[in-house]
Amino acid sequence: MVVPGTALYEEQMAGRFELPDTFGFLEELGIMVAKSDFTDCFFTSNHASNYLPIRARMPQEKNETTRLIQRVIESSNKKMLRPEYMRGL
């Protein structure tokens, strides 16, 4: 979400910034997980606003988690995601 009154909001309103689409957000999440270097972490991306809730022990489940994200992106199947009406924004 872009918050009204912020510089980013002004950029968006002026057409100089565009939020990623649904799968673009997942691509960003996949990059964050893939580039992470956790040694002992419980990673969650389970806020109600997230399209793909994730709970993973890092680094043990890093590869499995990145593969899951990639499979969802490659499928382009929105049925694999949290429905918009259930996303708490």
Image (cartoon, rainbow, N blue to C red):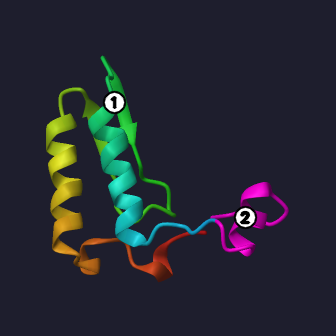
Q: Position of residue 55 (x, y in %)?
A: 32, 44
| Residue 65 % position (x, y) | 21, 45
Q: Which mark is residue 11?
A: 2
Q: The residue tagged with tag 1: helix, strand or loop?
A: loop
* Above or below, comparing residue 60 to residue 81 in the picture: above
x and y percentages locating residue 17 in the rendered image: 62, 65
The type of residue carrying mark 1 is: Ser
Image coordinates of residue 18 in percent, x first then y, are: 57, 69
- Classed neighbour count for the residue bearing mark 2: other residues with Cα under 10 Å, few (<14), some (14–19), many (≥20): few
- Is disc 1 surrounded by few (<14), some (14 to 19) or many (20+) residues within 10 Å? few
Residue 10 appears in which quarter of the rendering?
Answer: bottom right
User: Which numbered dot is residue 36?
Assistant: 1
Q: Secondary structure at mark 2?
A: helix
Classify residue 1 as left or right of residue 84. right
In this view of the protein, which residue sits in the foreground, 2 or 65? 2
**Front one among 46 and 73:** 73
Magenta highlight range: 1-16
Indicate the quadrant containing the N terminus: top left, top right, bottom left or bottom right. Answer: bottom right
